[in-house]
Amino acid sequence: MRKIILALAVLYPAAAFAQTSTPAPADPPTVGGKPLVQVGSTKPAAKKEAKPLSPAQKLQACQDIDDGTKERLNCYDAIYAPQPKAKTAAAKSVSECRYVKEEDERLTCFNGFADKIPKLPR
């Protein structure tokens, strides 16, 4: 009985010391000389990607900027890049507003179409 207790008293601290003093491996684990690869999704599951906004939703977002300002025109121009033409007829769609040369007229054109869009969910 004494021998068992003595053996446990000697072996128990040695086992505890061996468990805590293991150094971290310097090289990643390999199989056949090639590193192990973890297979799985690289994207976090909880993160949802936002859907791109439609041009109508972007135009409505521009409506939040003060009316008649250069910032609102810049917002519209970011959606439909300006391509001024010398002579333009009245715009039949919002995308044709980019052909208007004068900034004030282009802003009025965009505002006219943006005001007609029904409220869309954001």
Image: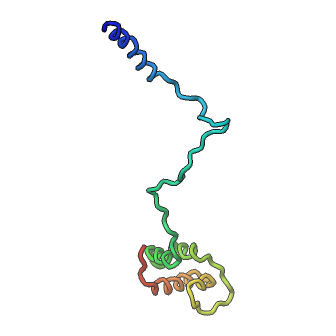
Q: Is residue 53 left or right of residue 4?
A: right
Name which quarter of the figure residue 17 lies in: top left
Coloring applied to the structure: rainbow
Residue nearest the viewer, comparing 88 with 35 = 35
Q: Is residue 26 left or right of residue 114?
A: right
Question: Which residue is painted at 57% across and 72% down in the image?
Answer: 78
- Position of residue 80 relative to residue 88, above or below, is above
Residue nearest the viewer, comparing 56 with 64 = 56
Residue 118 at x, y percent in the picture: 43, 84
Q: Quadrant of the N terminus?
A: top left
Question: Which residue is painted at 66% across and 80% down in the image?
Answer: 83
- Position of residue 87 relative to residue 2, above or below, is below
Q: Is residue 16 left or right of residue 102?
A: left
Question: Which residue is painted at 49% across and 62% down in the image?
Answer: 49
Name which quarter of the figure residue 76 lies in: bottom right
Name which quarter of the figure residue 16 lies in: top left
Q: Residue furthest top?
A: 2
Question: Which residue is painted at 46% across and 87% down in the image?
Answer: 116
Residue nearest the viewer, comparing 72 with 23 = 23
Residue 12 at x, y percent in the picture: 38, 16
